Each structure stands twice: as structure tokens, then as C-alpha cells.
């Protein structure tokens, strides 16, 4: 991690404060810079579905990544393992499946 867990927690708290002020309960961002800002995840895997999910009442965000990229999430983020949601490779280029089906 480039920053301390405390730094990431401060960033998350700022985002959640803004979410509360705007009446937002759940935030899903696919932007790699947002994923990095909130979790430390910085893999170049943005060509497939991935996102960070922030619930206003959760202690940590969820990092949603492809199985092939999960190692980077486990190594590069401060998140507990249960907050790294890994989707199977069967969702890649397999119509009618889509990686976000794994979130449903």
C-alpha cells in the first residue's frame, strides 16, 4: 500500500460524509482512480468489469474484481479478504453472461 490504512479510512469517511449529505446509500464506481483512492487497488485490469462499492454504513468498501486480478487486490489493498469480491472467469466474453451478473 502506498498509504496507511488510516489514510484510506479518512478518505472513505469523507466520501461517506458526502454520500450522507446527498442522500446516497450506495455508491458504485468503475473509475480506476476512485478504486485506487479508496482501496489502494492499482492494477491495470480496467479493460474488464471491476468496481469499488461503498455503502454508507459499511466499515470498508467492497472491491469487485476478476479472478485473474484478485491477487493484486489481496496484496495492494488494506481490505479484509471478505471485502474483495472475486468473479469467475466464466463471466468473461460468455454471452449472455456479464461480470456484473455475479453481483446480483
Image (cartoon, grey):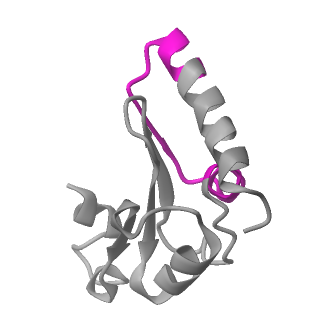
Residue at the spot x=24%, y=63% of the render? 101
* Residue in the foreground of this view, choosing between 17 and 92: 17
The residue lying toward the viewer, choosing from 97 and 21, is 21
List x then y, in percent, for residue 40: 67, 62
Region of the chain picked out in magenta, as a range = 18-38
Quick check: 25 above or below 71? Answer: above
| Residue displayed at 38% across by 38% down | 58
Q: How many marks?
A: 0
35 is within the stretch colored magenta? yes
**100 relative position to 66: left or right:** left
The residue that appears at 33% across and 87% down in the rendered structure is 89
Q: Is residue 44 left or right of residue 84?
A: right
Q: Is residue 8 above or below residue 21?
A: below
Q: Is 51 contained in the magenta span? A: no
Q: Position of residue 34 (x, y in %)?
A: 66, 49
x%, y% of residue 35?
Answer: 62, 55
Q: Is residue 62 above or below residue 11?
A: below
Res 99 → quadrant: bottom left
Quarter containing the N terminus: bottom right
Which residue is drawn at the image coordinates 64% and 74% (left, top)? 76
Q: Is residue 58 left or right of residue 16?
A: left
For this orientation, the residue located farthest to the right is 2
Q: Looking at the rendering, in which quadrant would you find the C terminus? A: bottom left
**Residue 2 % position (x, y):** 79, 65
Amino acid at each position: 500500500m502506498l498509504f496507511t490504512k488510516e489514510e484510506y479510512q479518512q478518505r472513505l469517511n469523507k466520501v461517506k460524509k458526502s454520500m450522507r449529505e446527498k442522500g446516497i446509500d450506495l455508491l458504485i464506481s468503475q473509475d480506476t482512480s476512485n478504486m485506487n483512492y479508496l482501496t489502494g487497488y492499482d492494477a491495470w485490469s480496467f479493460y474488464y468489469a471491476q468496481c469499488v462499492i461503498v455503502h454508507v454504513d459499511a466499515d470498508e468498501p467492497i472491491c469487485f474484481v476478476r479472478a485473474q486480478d484478485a491477487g493484486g487486490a489481496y496484496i495492494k489493498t488494506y481490505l479484509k479478504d471478505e471485502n474483495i469480491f472475486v468473479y469467475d472467469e466464466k463471466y468473461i466474453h460468455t454471452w449472455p453472461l456479464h461480470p456484473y451478473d455475479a453481483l446480483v
